[in-house]
Amino acid sequence: MGTSGTFGGSKSGLVPSWVDDPPSPPAAAPGSATPADGNGSGDGGDGGGGTDTQPPPAVYPPLRPPPAGSGLGAARGNLTRGARTSDGGAIRRGAGQYVSASGGRRGAARRMPSSRAAAGGIAGLARNFATQGPAEALRPFNLEGLAGAPALDVFVALTDALCPPGGTIDEAIARDAMLETIGALAAEGVGNFDEMTPGDLQEFFIGVVSRSIEGKILNEVGTNSIRVSPDLAAVERAQRMLHDFVDGCVRDRFAASGSSLADVTSQQIDDFVSDLYEAAFDLMQALGEAS
């Protein structure tokens, strides 16, 4: 644990959207029709020694078409089908195809730098909470004065510290994942921050990782697909199926690590978080292909 590649898994290549387009003809060489003697004649006649000979056209190898059912279009199609019919298998296939089209587990994880950074901050908070106490856990974020405050207030302040508003789309996905997880905690009811357990903070961490992956898929391929559902209940059902699938993969891979956040050293946090994202994407791809 704690080193890149801990979880292992398969890889798939990204298929560019332009792969079926014919190659563009080569551009004419600049000044190819200009005579060599500079007298303005380009006909190659008696008055000049120039030539209008063009270089032979470049020859490009043929482009190989993508395999059937690949790319973000396939993922979007399955998410649309799943939303319209409440087909959980189609939702899982769509999520798995998103991973494949994003370059496999490593490519998909690399597309989420802000979310991984936010998850790393939460992992460090949970580790320090378990080993040093609430105030010291909050000190790196200049929030130590909130140690005895309501946990929801602390998490909102932590969100502003890790993912301030007004950032890029990737940063917005991380921020939304934190706020949605806070909303889920509020629905369950939580007390003051200093009354929480390391397990509570671990749940917060897992929730943010899961919702950030879910948000990334929805942002890139799923939002319009899921909204084609005939009614609000169908939309909510499709989103819940996607969330349950992603959350299950994250939890499974976290459990497979055999460790808690309290066991991860500060030097290992970044690798641990990256490994978890990669492993979750890898499992999503495998289960999606099997659906």
Image: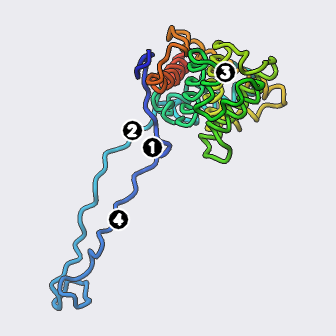
Inter-mark Cα distance, 4 to 1: 20 Å
Residue 64's tag is: 2
Question: Which residue is label 4 attached to?
Answer: 27
- Name which residue type carries label 3: Phe
- Name which residue type carries label 2: Arg
Inter-mark Cα distance, 3 to 1: 41 Å
- The image position of residue 263, as x and y in percent, is 50, 13
Q: Mark 3: give few (<14), some (14-19) or many (20+) Cα within 10 Å.
A: many
Marks 4 and 2, the one that precedes in the sequence? 4
Q: Nearer the viewer, mark 3 or mark 1?
A: 3
| Colour treatment of the image | rainbow
Q: Mark 1: give few (<14), some (14-19) or many (20+) Cα within 10 Å.
A: few
Could you say which is closer to the camera, residue 237 or residue 6? 6
- Name which residue type carries label 4: Ala
Question: Which residue is label 1 attached to?
Answer: 19
Inter-mark Cα distance, 4 to 2: 23 Å
Q: Are marks 2 and 1 in contact (CB under 8 Å)?
A: yes
